[in-house]
Amino acid sequence: MNELQKRDGKEIVRLPNDFVEAIYSLSVDTKKLFLSLCLHLNSKNEIKVHIGDIEREVGIRLEHLNQRHLKKLLKELMSKIIEIKDLENHNKWRLAVLVKEVNYDEGVVTAEISKALLPYFKLAQERLFTRFNIQNIKPLTSIHAIRMYELCKQFDDTGWRIIELDELRKMLKLEGKYKDNKDLRKWVLDVAKKQINTNTDINIDYELIKQGRKYTKIRLKIEKNPQKIEQKKNKKLAKQEKFKELETKLNRQYKNKAIKAKDGLNWFVTRIKVLNEKEVEIELTDLSRTQVIKIKLEQLPKMFKN
């Protein structure tokens, strides 16, 4: 658990406002991976996260996070260039990579945010930041929905914001695409609106504003949705209760039982913890030492002696 989680008790991502409005493009999984890395960024510019945490936080399934796919996402992350406004003078801009020097070892990813972006993320811990619970972007399947959600969360206290359409197209890297506003509505704005309103802690609506005979701006209406937050909270509590009941059942069934011979030693189960619908964590002891392993729930019965 990183410093932000310890302070808030929640999985809260803090993004620099300039980063939210920056010009860049990522695939959905790579964007989600980057947000998970941001959640684990500490004050020393160190990122260390287990792929199991990535699945829990942003919903990239573990079966998809094999080393080949993970390496593909990390390569994309390291190759993308972001165009971001200068901190001191917004009339200036700079180009920077997102992350550098990524390492992978036994399910753990370590990385560093590029030095050019560090001042922005440092400032985001003090002021000028956009914050949201990372679980809200977990169900989103459109990269435009994720970006629009961030842009709306930046102004969720005011309840509205206006953006130049040309600027929005730049931010989302849509220049040359969806030139007809009907297509922009259908493939970007309406998709984002539906996904955000269905899955997150806010509801949004929008209208395009004309200047003369041409649409030049978009006005976003943003409403917090406390009822949806409460529903998600209750659903999470229900799931936790279900996991507790399953843990109690598994411990009653398997605790203190010996598993099949391992390294010529007799190992006994001292504790079983349910991690999610498919995976459990088992603490084993041979009376002189202990170890903890993770396995699929379906594999659990196969481990024990007849």
Image (cartoon, rainbow, N blue to C red):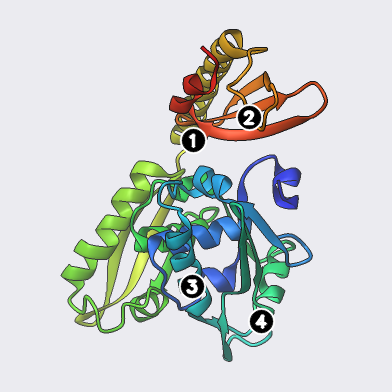
Horizontal relation, residue 262 to residue 194: left or right: right
First reached walking from the N terminus: tag 1 or tag 4: 4
Q: Secondary structure at mark 1?
A: helix
Residue type at mark 3 is Lys
Give the residue pinned by disc 2.
262
How packed mark 4 is, by other alpha carbons closer than 10 Å (few <14, some 14-19, many 20 or more), is some
Nearer the camera: disc 4 or disc 2:
2
How packed mark 3 is, by other alpha carbons closer than 10 Å (few <14, some 14-19, many 20 or more), is some
285, above or below 6, in the image: above
Horizontal relation, residue 189 to residue 304: left or right: left
First reached walking from the N terminus: tag 4 or tag 3: 3
Residue type at mark 1 is Ile
Q: Secondary structure at mark 4?
A: loop
How packed mark 1 is, by other alpha carbons closer than 10 Å (few <14, some 14-19, many 20 or more), is some
Give the residue pinned by disc 1.
229
First reached walking from the N terminus: tag 3 or tag 2: 3
Label pair 3/2, CB-CB below 8 angstroms: no
